[in-house]
Image: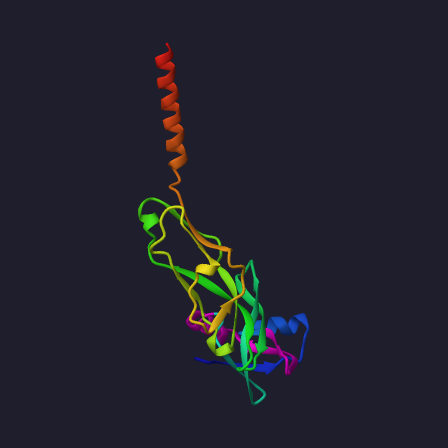
Amino acid sequence: MTAVIHAKERKSFTNSSRRKARKQGQIPAVIYGKKQENKAILVSESELLKILREQGRNAMLNIQLDGENHQALLYELQHDPMKNTIIHADFYVVDMDDEVDIEVPIVLIGEAKGVREGGVLQQTTHEVEVRAKPAHIPSAIEVDVTNLEIDDTIHVQDIQTDGQFKILDEPERVVATILPPENEDLDTADEQKSEEKEDGAVEE
């Protein structure tokens, strides 16, 4: 589903104008593309946050600017780490018939068998780059870990796709692993100490 976001051209670039815009609930941004010249704009912060919350970062956007509609993707977000607020956004105008490369989050689902046995699930890859037409970009890629046992690993090449997008990351890249129980090394050390004591007793 395409989400609508309203924008207006940004004509002032002073620090005071940026502060004023943010007080009015607007975020400085830029819109660009192969057939779209770079243009500085302001977008509604509340609209953008609602889209991110409800549809995710890879939602198709209909940016309404100067009476025209632009089909675009949110390509980059800049945050203020101190205030945890959005300070700038980049929007890339797309051709719906052309493929684009974009980062998509990986979401692990299910309770791994190895975790039920005391193992620890470690996710090492949280995003992968995919190539797809804009309408086929997934909001997230779900990876089922239910059948993973201790020491099992899922690689990028193990991820099932629907054929509408291609994952560009290296096939051998590790996505998730079930590590042995954290106290396994301690148990092994205790066993070794017990064996050493027993050996010492026998020698005496």
Instruction: Say how many tags the image has.
Output: 0
Pick whichever, 60 or 192, lies toward us: 192
Q: Position of residue 138 (x, y in %)?
A: 45, 71
Decide whether residue 45 is among the magenta residues: yes
For the point 39% across and 31% down, the residue is 188
Q: Position of residue 71 (x, y in %)?
A: 53, 82
Q: Quadrant of the image for the N terminus?
A: bottom left
Residue 24 seen anywhere in this rendered image of the structure = no
Stretch of the chain drawn in magenta: 28-56
Q: Quadrant of the image for the C terminus?
A: top left
For the point 57% across and 69% down, the residue is 76
Q: Which quadrant of the view contains residue 13?
A: bottom right
Q: Residue extending furthest bottom?
A: 67
Q: Which quadrant of the view contains residue 78?
A: bottom right
Q: Position of residue 145 (x, y in %)?
A: 37, 56
Q: Position of residue 139 (x, y in %)?
A: 45, 70
Compared across the picture, whether 123 is left or right of 76 comes to left
